[in-house]
Image: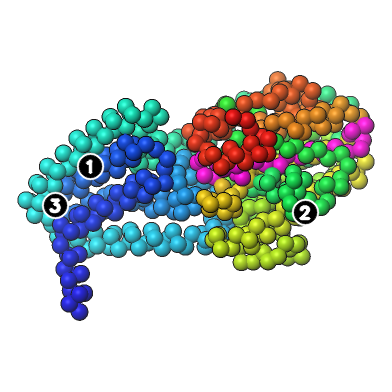
Amino acid sequence: MKLFRKIQKWFENQENLYYLFLIILIVPNIVLCFTEPMPLVAKVCNVLLPFSIYHMIMSWSGNCGKTFWILFPFLFFGAFQIVLLYLFGQFVIAVDMFLNLVTTNPGEALELLDNLIPAIIIVVLLYIPALILAAVAVSKKRRLSETFVRRERKRARITVIAGILSLVAAYLFDARYELKSDLYPANVCYNIALAFQRTAQTQHYAETSKDFTFQAKTTRPEKNREVYVMVIGETSRAANWSIYGYNRNTNPELTKIKGLTAFSHVLTESNTTHKSVPMLMSSVTAHDFNSIYRQKGIITAFKEAGYRTAFFSNQRYNHSFIDFFGKEADICDFIKEDAGDGSYNPSDDELLKLVAAELAENASKQFIVLHTYGSHFNYRERYPADHAFFLPDFPVDAELKYKDNLINAYDNSIRYTDNFLARLIRMLQEQDIDAAMLYTSDHGEDIFDDDRHLFLHASPVPSYYQIHVPFLIWMSDNYRKNYPDLFKNAEINRQKNISSSASFFQTMLELGGIDTPSRNDSLSVINASYTEKNRVYLNDHNEARSLNDIGMREEDFTMLQTKGIVYR
């Protein structure tokens, strides 16, 4: 009982609360010192300068509880940052993290939420009691003494001067140091402003792109019936495809299919769906990503050339470019939206039913785009129970101790994708027409692969597993007979370095015989003039950066070199 009274008395002391609130505010900065690779002088600045500013703000009022609540946005950022560090082990809150909040559907978020319980517990224990104590201080109008406030204001001024000097030192001794990118929470505030700017630009997309045209036309004979299918996978990494050398047989069907070319050295330029998929569906690349607000997608190019177009997605609306580009089609169906309550969770099989119905229309020229759910976490829910080849595949909670189960479930999802694509190809082959299929995934995934214990994707600095993706082209017997050079070129180029983000769109145009000023044959992997380009990655600020300049770790470069994908 005495101990309880002592604790109660300690928390009722406003001076104690003042210091406690300061410590809680600076916790993310202290943690980031241990997770972010930067020089000591920068780490000192990243703690001292924000601490001095918090100190100055906290000393403005005699009621520290009121000031603490005024600083609530920074507490929210701190909570978000801790969850992010739990997921990825490092990295500050990026622009894409904020955009993911508005482009990720609730179902995906709930699937992940159950696996963030440790991080959520830490956040609750750190922030909720402090906010309650602050609320009590406000409600009971408890105040700090004038003597204490004057003393702390004096100390705050001294620490602000020291903080500014540390910032100067950081710029002098670290050539790469940048306040808007490296100083928490200034970098978070900057990223929020960018996120709002991009959201506003996205909302005006219909207006800014209304006059865009591909000036597209077909170069193929009108009498020939043609069907082209573009398949965009989800979270499928090349490392787990046996067609690329994985030691498990995850591609039992595709390896037997005639007319299939698998490209081995393919990297995506983004590990986030809301950027990667729009690049796959348009001529936009990492070098000119911001031009996306003025452009339309590949479906419009095929429509202009006289094709009947369809877009079928096994994902929900994300209120961004995937939706915009998909809705350009003559027929558009986001099948998960069929159940408004969010309970409908169909397998990718449902997409094949829609393809069969579309093929039955027997149009002379058809273009179909499929956006699958592929291997998105939770992996166990991505395939039917009778497709569980690798066991045990349950439980699959996002914890290191379940790594083997997670890999089993993930590999089962790859085998299911293999089966899905093989059935799609058979459907097209049975049409006995000029037909082709192009497939890649938006990005890959980390599954506790090494001692870094990384999991999932969308980290501001990607790993090897997040950017090395499968890339497949299948051509029907008729197609290979009529366009033998395209198949020959594909085989010649299959071991070359390729950017899926830059080449997917361009290759699809050439496969479909679409002529447009937007076409660039040096990026088409079925063209004799295909040219390898320097590897780049679209960073958080929509800037194209070489892999050497984005902070990738040596482990990832080692993997890329082992696969023959990059050379340093």
Colouring of the image: rainbow
Horizontal and vertical percent position of residue 245? 74, 46
Q: Is residue 463 above or below residue 126?
A: above
Horizontal and vertical percent position of residue 88? 49, 49
Front: mark 1 or 3? 1
- Residue type for callout 2: Asn
**Mark earlier in primary sequence (1, 2):** 1
Query: What is the C-alpha distance between the residues marked 1 and 2?
Result: 57 Å
The picture quadrant where one finds residue 471 is: top right
Foreground of the two, 3 or 352: 3
Query: What is the C-alpha distance between the residues marked 2 and 3?
Result: 68 Å
Foreground of the two, 206 or 95: 95
- Give the crowd class for mark 2: few <14, some 14-19, many >=20 residues within 10 Å: some
**Is mark 2 in CB contact (under 8 Å) with mark 3?**
no
Circle number at residue 249: 2
Front: mark 1 or 2? 2
- Residue type for callout 3: Gly
- Give the crowd class for mark 3: few <14, some 14-19, many >=20 residues within 10 Å: many
Pointer 3: what residue?
62
Q: Identify the secondary structure beneath mark 3.
A: loop
